[in-house]
Amino acid sequence: MKGIIFTEFFDLVEQAFGFEVAEKIIDECDLPSGGVYTAVGTYDHTEILALVGTLSKITETPAPQLLITYGRFIYPKLHAQLKGMRLEFGSSFELFSSLDDIIHPEVLKLYPDAELPNFDARRLSESQLLLKYSSCRPFAYMAEGLILGASDYYHENLSVTLEHHNTDDTFYTDITITRQ
Ligand code: HEM
């Protein structure tokens, strides 16, 4: 997982819970990286899961809730990268429908070692889109947060529901997005 995901995570933890909590979760997790991250580095994605799990225990906040908050927080940073890719979308649905074919492939050109999920997009109606998430990593709740971040960006009112269909080796989640 790219270092930016970790550095932004610690920005959020420090803002929301303070520096001491950020230090404490690093101390409590026995991390191969030692908790030292640079934006351009690449780290094992299980480290972020360990950090989120420990933060969840310390703050008594469910881990899915933390991942949603984190996705919403980091979204503007990811969206800002679209400009450099000369990409622009008129609405959130247009953007979500381009994740698999355009956005994440562009991300891979920039960071060949990025680990990205798949999103099969199906328009259900004028106001509803189904995104079929699949990944060997369990970040569907972060996807929910990113979707809410996009709704903030486009000033749209979106609601999101998740339905998990995980198998032994792959995380599958049907993400239904409804525009009010
Ligand atoms: C709402 C729209 C988006 C959604 C739902 C989404 C979803 C995700 C998810 C869930 C992951 C975690 C990896 C996994 O699940 O296997 C991820 C990783 C990532 N995405 Fe997206 N993404 C969105 C938009 C973007 C945009 C606009 C950019 C930048 C142009 C971007 C760049 C990245 C990067 C750099 C990673 C990290 C890859 C790694 O750590 O190796 N995403 N995305």
Image (cartoon, grey):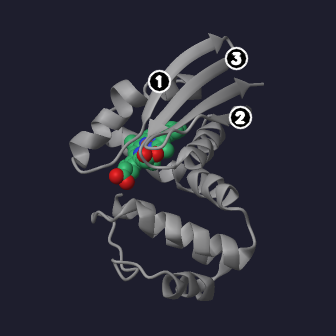
The image position of residue 122, as x and y in percent, is: 54, 16
Which secondary structure, mark 1?
Answer: strand
Sooner in the amino-acid sequence: mark 1 or mark 2: 1
Residue located at (53% from left, 72% from top): 51
Which residue is labeled 3 in the image?
Answer: 127
Report the front residue among 108 and 49. Answer: 49
Whole-number angstrom distance, CA of label 1 to CA of label 3: 17 Å
Q: Quadrant of residue 154?
A: top right
Residue type, label 1: Asp
The answer to whether the residues at label 1 and label 2 have Cβ atoms under 8 Å apart is no
Q: Is residue 63 above or below residue 164?
A: below
Q: Is residue 128 left or right of residue 97?
A: right
| Amino acid on which disc 3 is placed | Ser
Measure the alpha-carbon separation of dots 1 and 2. 16 Å
- Residue type highlighted by circle 2: Thr
Front label number (2 vs 3): 2
Q: Earlier in the sequence, mark 1 or mark 3?
A: 1
Residue drawn at (35%, 74%) of the image: 37
Q: Which mark is residue 161?
A: 2
- Rounded to the nearest angstrom, the CA distance separating label 2 from label 3 is 14 Å
Disc 2: CA contacts within 10 A as few (<14), some (14-19) or many (>=20):
few
